[in-house]
Image: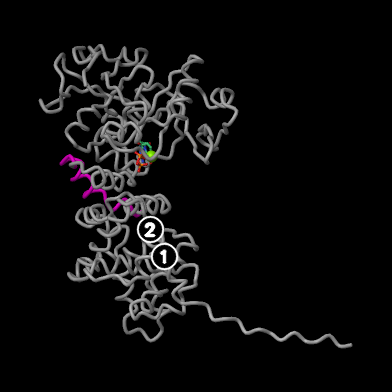
C-alpha cells in the first residue's frame, strides 16, 4: 500500500486553522486495490451510477474495514454527497426510509439492500487536527507525516452527561465530518472504488495495520455520548482480534455504568452480535473481564464469578457456538442466548418446587432490562426447559415439536462443553423425528350409510 497524496495541514500554524471552516481538510489517501470480486457487485453498481451523475460516493464503515483486513464484509454501506431524494430519483428499486434521518435503501434481488447515506455531521462536533505522537502511528510508508482529525475536546469536555448523550439530529455534511462522527478509527475509512483508493481522515489505516482499536477522539467523551460504543469496542476487539488502546480500555471501565441508561434494544442487538460474530467466547470473556457484563447481565456475571465449574462450562458452550459459526451453522438467537444463560437458569430452578415460577423470577428482570421481545423470551424458556428431558434421553415426547432441533442444538453445545459424546439425535436433530416413528393412526370404520 502506498500513500499517493499527503496533506500539508500538519505544517500549518495554529492561527491558520480558522481557515478550515471554508476549506475542508485533505485526507491521507492510500492507493489500495481491493480485488473487484470481493466487492459486492450491486454496491459497485450503486456507486458507479452515483459517480456518473456527478455525485461523490464511497464505500464506508464496516465493509471497508473488513475488506482491508481480508475478511468477508457482512454488508456494504455507501456514503454519498447526493441527497436522499436525489438517490431515489436515480434508482427505480429505491425507497427512502427514516423519519428523523433519511436514508436511501436500494433494493436488489434476493432481498439484498444497499444502504446509501448522505454524508452527515454531528452539529455539536468541531474538529482538531493532530500530528501523530508516536513513530508507530505513522503508516507504513515514507514521506511527510500524515495528520488525523479528531473531534475537538474544548467543545465537549465542559458539557455534562445529559448534554453529551447524543440526542440531536445529524445534518448533512462533508466527507471529513461524516468520518469523524463515527465511533472507531477503523470504522471511519472511505473507499473510492473507481480510483482504488482508501481515504483516511482519522488515522484508521495505521490502526488497522497496528491491530489497535481506538476511538475517534477522546474515548471518555465518545463513550459518554453513546455508551453502546463500549459494547462495540468489545465486539470489534474480540471479533477482529484487535488490541484495545489503553486509554480506550480505561474509559470502558470508567464509563461502563452508563450502559444502564442506554437504549435496551441496542444493548440486546450488540449482545446478539457478540454471540453471532464467531467470537462469542472472547466477547463474553472480555465483557466479563472489563466489568461490562455485570452492567448488562449481572445474573450471568455473578454466576461466572462464583461458580468456577459453571464458568468453565459456559465458556465451553460459547466455544462450541464459535465452532458452529465457523462452519456456517450459526444457532438461532434463542439458542445462542440459551447457551449463555443455561448455567444461571439451572441454578435458579434447581430444587425449586414450582419450576415455572422460579424460572419466571429469574428471567423477569433480565427481560425488562434487555427489553427481550416476547417471542424470544418464550423461545428461550422452551429451549432451556426442554434440557431436562433431553439430558435423560426422553426425547419422544418432544421430538416432533417444532422447537426440537433448536433445543437439541443447545443440548449439543452443552455436551460438547462437557467433552461428552453426542447421541445421534443431537448430531442430526432433524432425523430424530423419524427415530420416533409416528404411531399408526387408528382406522375409523366407515359407517355404512343408512339406507
Ligand atoms: P458489524 O460488522 O457488526 O455490522 P459495523 O462496523 O458494520 O459492524 P454497523 O452497526 O453496521 O457496524 O454500523 C456501520 C458503521 O456506522 C460503523 O462502521 C461506524 O462507522 C458507524 N457507526 C455505527 N454505530 C455507531 C455509533 N454508535 N457511533 C458512531 N458511529 C457508529
Ligand atoms: Mg455493518
Q: Secondary structure at mark 2?
A: loop
In this view of the protein, which residue sits in the foreground, 269 or 400?
400
| Residue at 32% in and 75% down | 346
Q: Is residue 69 above or below residue 83?
A: below
Q: Position of residue 148 (x, y in %)?
A: 24, 23
Q: Secondary structure at mark 1?
A: helix
In this view of the protein, which residue sits in the foreground, 163 or 311?
311
Q: Is residue 215 above or below residue 440?
A: above
Q: CA distance from mark 2 to mark 1?
A: 7 Å
In the image, residue 293 lies in the stretch drawn in magenta: no
| Residue at 33% in and 77% down | 391
Count how many numbered circles sit on residues in the image.
2
In which quadrant of the rendered image does the N terminus lie? top left
Residue with the mark numbered 1: 406
Majority SS type along the magenta span: helix
Instruction: Say which mark, if any, is on residue 143.
Output: none
In the image, residue 255 lies in the stretch drawn in magenta: yes
Tag 1: Cα neighbours inside 10 Å, few (<14), some, or many (≥20)?
many
In which quadrant of the rendered image does the C terminus lie? bottom right
Q: Position of residue 28 (x, y in %)?
A: 26, 19
Residue with the mark numbered 2: 331
Marks 2 and 1 close (CB-CB < 8 Å) = yes
| Residue at 20% in and 28% down | 206
| Boundaries of the magenta span | 244-260
Q: Is residue 49 above or below residue 117?
A: above
Q: Is residue 103 left or right of residue 140?
A: right
| Mark 2 or 1, nearer chain start | 2
Q: Is residue 364 above or below residue 371?
A: below
Q: Position of residue 216 (x, y in %)?
A: 27, 33
Q: Is residue 445 left or right of residue 294?
A: right
Amino acid at each position: 500500500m502506498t500513500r499517493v497524496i499527503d496533506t500539508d495541514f500538519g505544517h500549518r500554524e495554529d492561527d491558520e486553522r480558522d481557515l478550515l471552516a471554508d476549506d475542508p481538510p485533505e485526507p491521507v489517501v492510500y492507493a489500495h486495490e481491493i480485488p473487484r470480486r470481493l466487492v459486492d457487485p450491486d454496491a459497485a453498481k450503486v456507486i458507479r451510477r452515483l459517480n456518473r451523475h456527478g455525485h461523490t460516493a464511497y464505500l464506508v464503515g464496516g465493509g471497508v474495514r473488513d475488506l482491508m483486513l481480508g475478511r468477508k464484509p457482512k454488508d456494504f454501506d455507501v456514503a454519498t454527497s447526493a441527497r436522499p431524494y436525489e438517490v431515489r430519483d436515480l434508482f427505480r428499486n429505491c425507497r427512502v426510509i427514516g423519519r428523523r434521518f433519511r436514508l436511501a435503501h436500494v433494493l436488489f434481488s434476493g432481498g439484498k439492500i444497499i444502504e446509501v447515506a448522505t454524508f452527515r455531521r454531528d452539529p455539536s462536533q468541531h474538529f482538531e487536527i493532530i500530528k501523530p505522537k508516536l513513530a508507530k502511528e505513522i503508516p507504513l510508508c515514507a514521506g511527510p507525516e500524515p495528520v488525523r482529525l479528531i473531534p475537538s475536546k474544548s467543545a465537549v469536555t465542559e458539557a455534562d452527561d445529559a448534554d453529551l448523550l447524543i440526542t440531536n439530529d445529524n445534518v448533512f455534511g462533508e466527507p471529513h465530518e461524516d468520518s469523524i462522527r463515527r465511533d472507531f478509527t477503523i470504522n471511519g475509512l472511505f473507499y473510492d472504488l473507481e480510483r482504488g483508493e482508501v481515504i483516511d481522515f482519522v488515522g484508521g489505516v495505521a490502526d488497522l495495520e497496528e491491530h489497535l482499536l481506538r476511538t475517534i477522539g477522546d474515548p471518555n467523551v465518545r463513550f459518554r455520548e453513546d455508551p453502546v460504543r463500549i459494547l462495540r469496542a468489545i465486539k470489534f476487539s474480540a471479533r477482529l482480534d484487535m488490541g484495545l488502546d489503553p486509554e480506550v480500555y480505561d474509559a470502558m471501565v470508567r464509563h461502563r455504568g452508563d450502559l444502564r441508561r442506554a437504549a435496551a434494544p441496542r444493548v440486546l442487538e450488540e449482545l446478539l452480535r457478540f454471540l453471532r460474530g464467531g467470537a462469542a467466547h472472547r466477547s463474553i470473556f472480555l465483557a466479563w473481564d472489563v466489568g461490562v457484563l455485570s452492567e448488562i447481565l449481572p445474573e450471568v456475571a455473578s454466576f461466572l464469578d462464583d461458580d468456577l465449574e459453571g464458568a468453565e462450562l459456559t465458556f465451553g458452550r460459547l466455544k462450541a457456538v464459535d465452532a458452529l459459526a465457523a462452519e456456517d451453522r450459526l444457532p438461532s438467537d434463542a439458542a445462542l442466548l440459551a447457551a449463555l444463560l443455561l448455567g444461571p437458569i439451572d441454578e435458579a430452578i434447581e430444587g425449586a418446587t414450582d419450576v415455572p415460577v422460579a424460572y419466571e423470577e429469574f428471567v423477569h428482570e433480565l427481560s425488562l432490562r434487555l427489553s427481550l421481545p416476547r417471542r424470544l423470551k418464550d423461545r428461550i424458556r422452551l429451549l432451556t426447559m426442554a434440557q431436562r428431558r433431553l439430558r435423560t434421553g426422553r426425547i419422544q415426547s418432544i421430538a416432533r415439536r417444532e422447537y426440537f432441533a433448536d433445543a437439541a442444538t443447545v443440548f449439543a453445545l452443552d455436551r460438547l462443553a462437557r467433552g461428552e459424546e453426542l447421541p445421534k439425535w443431537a448430531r442430526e436433530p432433524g432425523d430424530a423425528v423419524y427415530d420416533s416413528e409416528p404411531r399408526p393412526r387408528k382406522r375409523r370404520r366407515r359407517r355404512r350409510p343408512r339406507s
